[in-house]
Amino acid sequence: MQELLRIEDLAVSFALPHRSVYAVRQVSLAVQPGECIGVVGESGSGKTQVFMAAMGLLGSNAASTGSVRFGGKEILGANPKQLNRIRGSKLTMIFQDPMTSLTPHLKIGTQLAEVLVVHAGKSWHDARAAACRMLERVRVPEAERRLNQYPHELSGGLRQRVMIGMSLLCEPMLVIADEPTTALDVTVQAQIIALLDAMRREVGMALVLISHDLGVVAGLADRILVVYAGRVVESASAIELFRQPQHPYTAELLKCIPSLSGPRLERLPTLPGQPPRPGDSADGCAFAPRCRWVAERCRKERPMLRAKDAMHDAQVACHFPLVT
Amino acid sequence: MNASSKGELMLRVRDLRVDFGSRTALCDVGFDLFAGETLGLVGESGSGKSTMARAILRLVRAVRGSVEWRGRDLLSCDATELRRQRRELQIVFQDPLASLNPRMTVGEIVSEPLRIFEPTMDAGARLIRVGAMLETVGLSTGVIGRYPHEFSGGQCQRIGIARAMIQRPRLLICDEPVSSLDVSIQGQIVNLLLDLQRDTGTAMIFISHNLAVIRHLSHRILVIYSGRLVEIASRDALFGSPIHPYTRALLAAVPPARPVPRGESPEPHPAPEIASGRAPAGGCAYRDRCRYAVAACATAVPLLEEVAPEHWVACHRARDLIA
């Protein structure tokens, strides 16, 4: 099967008044059809910018280099007209805040139908009927009535369901979901995750799930990429990553997730220090200042992302990967 | 509500009610808080968590009820008395940057409570106190002349905590203090609060929607739904044998700590959401989302009842659900 999305050596930089800073560097990844990839990182790690660049959604002060191929075609730097042939239909994105990503003064039905009118050339009448069916599919109660409502009349969870429905209208091959549950309550979050999972199985699309929350990603992703300071530091199957993290950052991050089971701790495990800010540049490993296994080499030479051995497809960017 | 008091009764809240216009944000809220105790307050957005914090500090006006702080009613006392009492009551807010005045230096921010409450203290002594406090929260004295925007979210939260703790308050309310922080930073801030509490004996109300965080630092937990307390229990009872269907749904909705191989995941039963986001009026506010709802739930509001020692639940079906 052909790769759906291949990103090669992507770099994203932002121009500031007197200098430019890199938010993303040397990121390469591939998404296979039907696969779910989790992209995990702290705020400011560049995880979102990778996919904003891929979608051609970077601001005017940003520049991107490298290559992004979707279905074999280069789309990095493509003009909006070319991009719009796939964006919103074959390649769609769901954002964190379902309120600000819906247009407040248009009815739900209009916003959904518009997607099909623009991308699939349907008549408004047919598009509206299809929109209603989609709302039912994403488990929106009273779908018909919702079409005539405005976004503010819906709860946050329902708005996110509408966004998910909208992203699925044209039977996309790839949906990129950027923190789709971060703005929602835990009970609603669990339902949205279940919905994304069900939709992936029903529709068969690939899903990129971007999140700061390893727990959210754990339930859905086949494979997880961990991003730190603009670079991928580890990539492994979800099961493998949780079972045997190889990068010290991943290992520490996993320890930091407070759990509902197991012994209660007097103190929470912590990761000392701060993540570097974009623009902080050092020669060595970006994680070196916070790493408890740091060695001299880590401060001088940047580790490249490479496979541990030929047996595994797991990759890690560390001079001294953790082995158990 | 807690007979086996570990320490001195500090805060006694009874029958607290807050209305915003025609909408009731908080109703029939009552609980006790003892010295050195940490009370976790969980609930979803809009459930009244922050309103409760603000009503206790009289930052929003309660229409009914009493908030007794060490025997003195904060809701009925005059402004001078309120100010005197507030010295002992501090709050740390969710958004660390927005809660710091951008035009004040860190030194000015952290020393402001001293300038207000201890106006006779000379500048030198104040500077020493501020420097010591900054070091306690893990910052250096070198940050005194810098401004909030120069710091990360976690560091700003440390500044907020330094400001709250410099008066050595006896009650610290933390309103989602780690929710906007990265996972790797959350633990640092939670541990800092735990250390401060251990060293000062401050009573704490810790508001969060993150049950795992709440579990690690609370002695007792209040669960709030749609403006009413629906369950009060010790940490072990709440996490070990939750009774209220909403508490159970909350616990079931927490993402797994690690991936579960396909097909093996136990089917969670998180509560369905209400379409409008608004709870129904009259009766139990949770009934539309509740798997156990019966006819009685639509007619009478369930009141908190002690169904097991120190375990209070507001649910008509509580007795059936204990098993």
Image: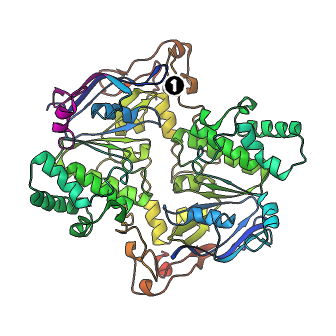
Q: Nearer the viewer, residue A213 or A56?
A: A56
Please indicate whether residue A214 sits to the left or right of residue B127 in the image.
Answer: left
Instruction: Please state the horizontal and vertical placement of residue A10, each as a whole percent of the image.
Output: 32, 23
Up-down relation of residue A217 to residue A70 (above or below): below
| Magenta part of the chain | A65-90
Instruction: Please state the horizontal and vertical placement of residue B308, each as a whole percent of the image.
Output: 59, 76
Q: Nearer the viewer, residue B232 or B299?
A: B299
Residue occupying image coordinates x 71% and y 66%: B33
Verify whether residue A76 appears in magenta: yes
Residue occupying image coordinates x 37% and y 21%: A305
**Numbered disc 1: what chain?**
A
Residue occupying image coordinates x 48% and y 12%: A301
Please indicate whether residue A54 sits to the left or right of residue B26 in the image.
Answer: left
Instruction: Please state the horizontal and vertical placement of residue B226, each as a whole percent of the image.
Output: 50, 71
Work out whether residue A293 can be spotted.
yes
Quadrant of the snapshot with the N terminus of chain B: bottom right
Please indicate whether residue B72 sits to the left or right of residue A307 in the image.
Answer: right
Verify whether residue B150 appears in magenta: no
Task: Name the residue carrying label 1.
Answer: A287
Residue occupying image coordinates x 28% and y 51%: A196
Q: Nearer the viewer, residue A202 or A118?
A: A118
Work out whether residue B267 can be spotted.
no
Q: Tell me how many marks there are.
A: 1
- Regarding mark 1 in the picture, which secondary structure is present there? loop
Up-down relation of residue B67 to residue A315 (above or below): below
Q: How is the image coloured?
A: rainbow
Instruction: Please state the horizontal and vertical placement of residue A195, each as a whole percent of the image.
Output: 29, 55
Q: How busy is the neighbourhood of tag 1: few (under 14 within 10 Å), some, or many (20 plus)?
A: many
Inspect the image, locate mark 1, and give the three-letter code of the amino acid beneath it.
Phe
